[in-house]
Image (cartoon, rainbow, N blue to C red):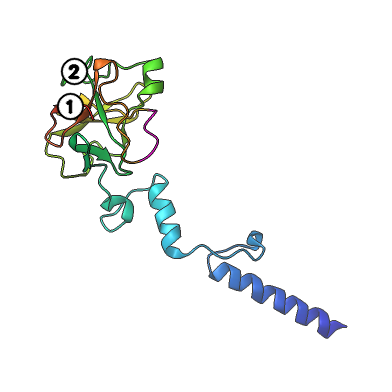
Amino acid sequence: MKNLWTTSWAVGAAALLALTACGGTADDAGAPAESEAAQTESADTGGGGDTEDSPAAAAAALMTADSPVGEIVVDSESMAVYYFDNDEPNSGESTCTGDCLVAWPPVIVDSETPKVDGVTGEVGTIETPDGELQATIDGLPVYYYVDDKQPGDITGQAVGDVWWLVAPNGDKITDTP
């Protein structure tokens, strides 16, 4: 009986050691251990500092895409971004507040100097009232439109004659599809 208990204990200890060595814990109860790359990516996207080699660091916050009205600025998920005519360039603030922000959420970025690809307008940031960084192009805040549901949607173009897609050089696009 003593040998059976000793063998069972040794097998259990070996299994625990194997789980721990693979990055898991005893609480994983046989769940596959997350790969080292996945753990690094989770740490990088979870607020940890991005390194030059991480996938999160390589992705541009703003880039360009073709649309029915020409080349436009989009985010890293290819969602269109818009200007609001009521905003003043270089004012350091957004005039879209309250219910406006429900329909037109700000484009939030992780850095005061967001990475861009193909955007030639001057890209910067302003601070939102809750302390996040909202992207700006040529001193104007940029926004999403809540009814744009998938990449390629530009349903916010010309809404109320005050919302406009953004050209890569920072110009307001006033053409309609």
Quadrant of res 84 = top left
**Between disc 2 and disc 1, whose residue precedes?**
2
Q: Quadrant of the N terminus?
A: bottom right
Most distant residue in the right direction = 1
Name the front one of labels 2 and 1: 1
* Residue 19: image location, x then y, percent: 60, 69
Label 2: which residue? Answer: 91
Q: Is residue 80 above or below residue 43?
A: above
Q: Which three-letter amino acid code belongs to the residue tagged 2?
A: Ser
Tally of numbered tags:
2
Question: What residue span does the magenta drawing correspond to?
Answer: 146-150
Q: Are marks 2 and 1 in contact (CB under 8 Å)?
A: no
* Residue 79: image location, x then y, percent: 31, 38
- At mark 1, the secondary structure is loop
Name the foreground residue: 158 vs 7.
Answer: 158
x 42%, y 46%: residue: 46
Residue 158: image tag: none
Q: Which three-letter amino acid code belongs to the residue tagged 1?
A: Asp
* Residue 17: image location, x then y, percent: 61, 72
Q: Quadrant of the C terminus?
A: top left
- In the drawing, does residue 145 fall left or right of residue 93? right
x 16%, y 40%: residue: 119
Q: Is residue 174 above or below residue 52?
A: above
Q: Is residue 8 above or below residue 136?
A: below
Q: Is residue 113 magenta?
A: no
Label 1: which residue? Answer: 175
- At mark 2, the secondary structure is loop
Query: Label 1 neighbourhood size at 10 Å, few (<14), some (14-19), many (20+)?
Result: few
Query: Label 2 neighbourhood size at 10 Å, few (<14), some (14-19), many (20+)?
Result: few
* Dominant SS type (magenta): loop
Most distant residue in the front direction = 177
